[in-house]
Every structure is written in C-alpha cells, then in structure tokens.
Image (cartoon, rainbow, N blue to C red):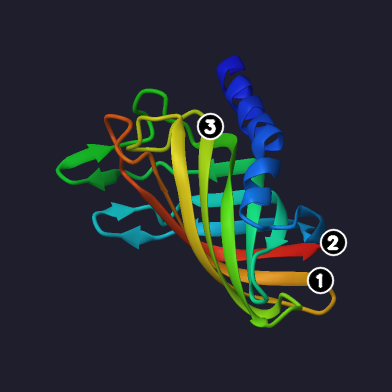
Amino acid sequence: MPRVTRLLACLIAAPLLIAHAPAARAGLDLEEGHWRVELATTYGIHSGTTNRSGNVLTTGTVEYEIPATPRTTLGLRLMPLFLYTQDDTSIKDSDDWYRLDEEDASDTVWGGGLGLTGRIYQVKDEYRGWYGEAEGLAVVHDNKIIGNSSNFNFLIGLGVGYKFKSHWHTVLKYEHISNSSIGARNAGANSLGLGLGYSF
C-alpha cells in the first residue's frame, strides 16, 4: 500500500512542476482555462472473448481545461477516484481462463491516475453544446483486475456529451483498461456508461 501511495503522489506532483513551460511553448494560455469536475459510472460489457458484464467502474476527476482553438480544448486530468468492482465470474482471454480467486485479484480495485483529454465543441468560442472527447490516463491501483497481472494500467476512452449554459455537462462514455502487455497477463476491461460534471 505505501508503494501505491508514493506512485499516486508522483502522478499528482509531476505535472504541477512541469506543465507551465510546455503549455507556454505550445501557445496555450493557462490563464484562459477553467476547472472541470466529473463523476462517472460505467458498466462492464462483453467484448470479444472477455465478458465483464458484472463489473462497475466509478471514477471521479478534476481537470484543468485550456482552450486550444475556438472549438477545441486540451485538459490535464487528475483522477483521485478510481474504483473498479468485479464479480466472481470467469474471464476468458485467448485460451486462458481467469477467476477472482487468482493471486492478488480482489472484488474491489481502487487507485488513482493522471492524464490528458481533448475535446471538440459545437458552439465556437463558448466551448459548450454538443462535444466529442478523447481521454488517456495512466492509472495506479491496489489489487488487480481479473486476468490483468499489473497494478499499473492505462485507461483510454471516448465520449459524446452536452455542456449546458449553466456549466453543467453530461457525457456518454466508452472506456478501456489495459496494461499494454507490460504485465504477463493483459485481459482488457471495456465499459460503457454516463458521467455528470460541472465547470467553473
């Protein structure tokens, strides 16, 4: 557990120390950005040979979103809440079967992460209305996801959402968790669900 805590601390501190210089070189104005918080719940789906239909991923994120063009933004996203609950069903990956009782697997996986987002908005200069988004985060967690032998994974996702004039937004999300074969076992986890958030 101390190792996970140290890794989370590094994930939080690193971008705060280096974010300003690259943003300035890219022509992004950090002072024009705003904060965005979001709580999302996605439900595991059956894809390929892997059935995660009994699993639930809950995430909480805090993001600093910066205008890049009149319709697009880039965001630095911190995920202090990563909670993945899994049931006791078997997972088939290629020719191998995995169960919840495998070494280090647990019905509850928790952790946090850090990454980037990009969005394209419908309403020019106001960054609202319909939007599409893509996200990529590095996630460190305690316990293991069934069929995945690593405590370090990548979460990538796509979403279609709507941001209201009142600064609230809702988004339909597809998310994929994988360790990119860093670990010996890498059964992916796909999920689909909704997020709700507020910008200020």
**Rendered position, 176 above or below 186:** below
Q: Looking at the image, can residue 174 be seen?
A: no
CA–CA distance in space, label 3 to label 1: 31 Å
Depth check, mark 3 against mark 1: the one in front is 1
Q: Residues within 10 Å of mark 2 (few under 14, many from 20)?
A: few
Residue at image location 48% in from the left, 59% down from the top: 157
Q: Position of residue 45 (x, y in %)?
A: 40, 60
Q: Locate the C terminus by quadrant.
A: bottom right
CA–CA distance in space, label 2 to label 3: 29 Å
What amino acid type should be assigned to the residue bearing mark 1? Answer: His
The local secondary structure at tag 2 comes to loop
What amino acid type should be assigned to the residue bearing mark 3? Answer: His
Residue bearing the label numbered 2: 200
**Residue nearer the viewer, 55 or 165:** 165
Q: Residue furthest left?
A: 95
Q: Position of residue 191 (x, y in %)?
A: 46, 58
Residue at image location 58% in from the left, 18% down from the top: 1
Give left or right: position of 129 versus 4: right
Q: Position of residue 147 (x, y in %)?
A: 32, 37
What amino acid type should be assigned to the residue bearing mark 2? Answer: Phe
Q: Residue furthest top?
A: 2
Q: Position of residue 186 (x, y in %)?
A: 30, 39
Residue bearing the label numbered 1: 167
Residue 121, image quadrant: bottom right
Q: Residues within 10 Å of mark 3 (few under 14, many from 20)?
A: many
Residues at circles 2 and 1 in contact by the CB criterion of under 8 Å: yes
Q: Looking at the image, can residue 97 be seen?
A: yes
Q: What mark, if any, has residue 141 been given in the picture? A: 3
The local secondary structure at tag 1 comes to loop
